Amino acid sequence: MERYARQTTHLSLVIYFPQLIVEPTETVKKRTCQAAYKMMAQYDTVGVSIIDQLDIFITESMLDEVLYLCDFRVPDWFFPIMAERECIVSLIQDPSMVPPPLDDDAQPEPDASHHSISEKLGVIESKLSKLVYGHVENYQPLPNSMGAIFTVGEDSKVPGLWTPVHYLTKAAALKALFPNVIENLGIPEERLIPPSYVMIFEGTRAREVLDSAEQFASDVLRIAFFDGMEPGVSQRVANTIHELEKLGNYVISQSKMVVALERTHSDPMLVLSQLGPVYISSDVKSGTKEVETWFPPRIEVEEIPDPFGPPPPEPELPEGVFRDSVGNLVKEEFIEDEHGNARLLRTVLEYAPGMEPGEDEDEEEEDEDEEEEEGEREEVYDMMMPPSMPEIPPETQEPEASQETPAPEGGTEPAPEPETPA
C-alpha cells in the first residue's frame, strides 16, 4: 500500500453512510446529504476540493478492504442497511500536493524526491481528519466535530461519515472504491499485507534464527538487516545473511535482524521467542503497520531474495584474480622492477570478513614481505634472476684453462717458488 500512497499524496476520500442520506422524493429528485453539504462548505478552509463523487453499494467484504489497518468498527446493524442503500463517496484533492507532470522522456529521481514525498504523506489525511473528527489521533470524534454532529444509531452512537486517518488506509480505500485512480498510476498490482507482526534480533544471532525459522518459511514475509531498531529511520545494510557476512564482524555486531511474520498461528512466535528477540510487536494491528514501515514497497517492482536460499554464485573473476585460503579476493600480476627483475605483485582487492587491515591474516605468512599503500596490502616475491645475468648450475660450468699471467712491461719477474727441501 505504501507504493500507492506515495503516488496519491494529493488524494483522499470521505464516505457518507446511508443513514445520513435522504432518498429522492417527488419534490426533490436526487439524493441529498446534509453532512456532505456541510463538509463541502469547509473544504475551502483547508485548501481541498471535490474532484469526483459516486453512489456505491459497499459490501461487508469491500468494507474490510476499505478499513485496512483501521480500528473504526462498523456495527452489525449497519450491513443490512448498506446492502439495500448506497453510500456516497467523495474523492477529495489537495491542489497544492498534485505532483507536476513528467515529460515523455523525463524519469523521476527516487533519491532526490524520496524525502519530499515522505513529507507529503499524511498531509491531506490530517486536513480531512481534523474536519471529521476534530483531531488526527483516532476515529473517536471530539464534540462539535462533523463526526460528533452527524452520528447514527440509537443506543451506541456511530459517526455517520468516515475518512481515513492514515495514508496506508487511504491507499487501500482508494484501491477498493476508485480502482481507476490506482490503475492510472501504472503501478503493478500488490496484495494487502496480511495480519502480521515483527520480531527483531541481534545480528550476531542471524544464523541461529534462520535455522529455527526455516521450518516456518511459509509464514515468513520478509527478513532483512538494519543498522538500528527505528522503523523508517534505520538504514538497511543487507537483504540476506550472505550479504551481511561479507560486511565483516563489526557491522554484524551492530546490525539488527528484522523478521516479518504472518500471523497464521502461534508456533513461529513461540519458537523464535526462545532465541532472545530484542523486540516483538505488541499486537497484530501495530505489527502490520510496522511491516509496511520496515519494508515499504518501492515504485519499481522489487525482487525479494529468499532468506533461506543458498549464497548467490560468485561472479566470474578476471584472469589473475582469485580468493586465497582465508577468503581474501586477491589479484596477482607480474611486474618488472628498476633492475629488470621480474616480480609477482599480489594485491588484496577485498578482505574476507574479519581479515581487515590490523587483524592477523595468517600466522604462517609472518616471514613474507608486506607493503601497505592506500589501504591495500601488496606482497612482492622474487621469481627469477635478471635475464642479463643468468645463473649457471655448477655441474654445467666448463673448467677454465690455466693461463700464466704475463708480467707487465718494465715490471719485475714474479718471485720464484721456494724449493721444497728434500
Image: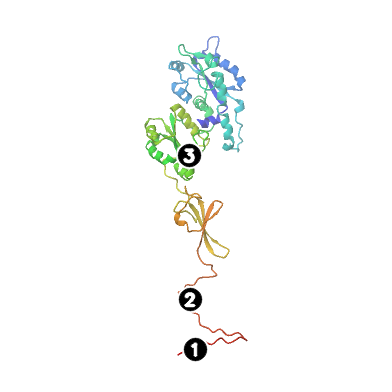
Q: Residue 264, position in %: x, y?
A: 39, 30
**Amino acid at circle 3:** Ser
Q: CA distance from mark 2 to mark 3?
A: 67 Å
Q: Is residue 184 visible?
A: no
**Amino acid at circle 1:** Glu
**Is 377 rendered above or below residue 336?**
above
Marker disc for residue 255: 3
- Residue at 37% x, 30% y is 266
- Looking at the image, what colour scheme do you see? rainbow
Q: Residue furthest bottom?
A: 422
**Which residue is disc 2 drawn over?**
397
Q: CA distance from mark 3 to mark 1?
A: 93 Å
Picture quarter with the C terminus: bottom left
**Which residue is disc 1 drawn over?**
419
Q: Residue 145, position in %: x, y?
A: 55, 16
Secondary element at tag 3: loop
Which residue is more in the foreground, 101 or 143? 143
- Residue at 50% x, 14% y is 151
Marker disc for residue 351: none
